[in-house]
Amino acid sequence: MAIIAIIAGMQAEIDAFASGDGQTITHHGLAVRRIARHGHDIVLASAGIGKVNAALATTIVALGFGPQLVMALGTAGSLDADDGEPRWLTGAVQHDYGAARHDGFVAYAAGSVPIGPARAPPFAALPQPAGLGLPQSIIASGDCFVEAPALAANVRAAHGACLIDMETAAIAQAAALLGLPWCGIKAASDGADGSSAETFEANFLATAARAAAAAERAVPLLF
């Protein structure tokens, strides 16, 4: 039986996956729900918002439950003409890690010294399993909720990302340091623009449900 850890930023994103199933325990202050699906043991946790919370939750779950795979799940902002349908993540990059210079911000690989030639490759995810058929995207993560079209455009141009959130790249980095493969399914709730706050609030629950439904379809195809 494989153990899959699913991490999201907000509780409703976790609750949308196999809603009502399983038992919840508290592990090092983190509420963790465990369920059985398709021969796998699935461990679900809401990290809280932001990269620090995401990395901590991933580490707590990984060390406490020994998963063979970590999945990032939930909602995101769109950096392109997104229809809100779930996407399989091919990579994740921290768009706000780097050097602030007089002529603008320069992104570097997370954890590297932000001096010298700049390079910020994404953390590569597992390939999408055959038969799932989701559109694919790189996601950019940073510790801010983006409501600025100019910033959204800059992040897309710099990283080739179609989605933006506040957790996934930190989940990916923690998984990499722990020697674990990772994957992710995210759906866009808003356009990372001036109306993002209102759009997010209106679309959040439905978007979280779409992402969770796609993740439920993915689970039996992962191993």
Image (tube, rainbow, N blue to C red):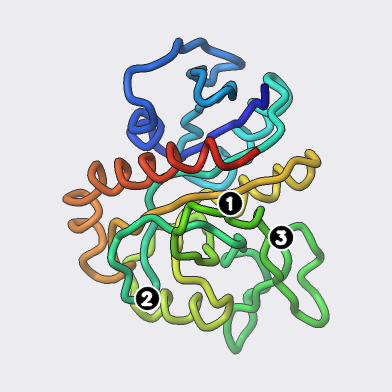
Element under disc 3: loop
Name the image quarter holding the N terminus. top right
Q: Are marks 1 and 3 in contact (CB under 8 Å)?
A: no
Q: What is the C-alpha distance between the residues marked 2 and 1?
A: 24 Å
Q: Which mark is residue 80?
A: 2
Task: Looking at the image, tell me whether mark 2 or mark 1 is earlier in sequence order.
Answer: 2
Residue at 71 percent of width and 70 percent of height: 121
Give percent across and percent down for residue 61: 64, 26
> What residue sits right under mark 1 in the picture?
129
Q: Residue at label 3?
A: 110
User: Callout 2: few (<14), some (14-19), or many (20+) C-alpha neighbours within 10 Å?
Assistant: some
Tell me which amino acid carries mark 2: Asp
> For the residue labelled by badge 1, is the local secondary structure a helix, a strand or a loop?
loop
Left or right, 149 with reference to 73 = left
Q: Quadrant of residue 16?
A: top left
Distance from the alpha carbon under mark 1 to that under mark 3: 27 Å
Q: Name which of mark 1 and mark 3 comes first in the sequence.
A: 3
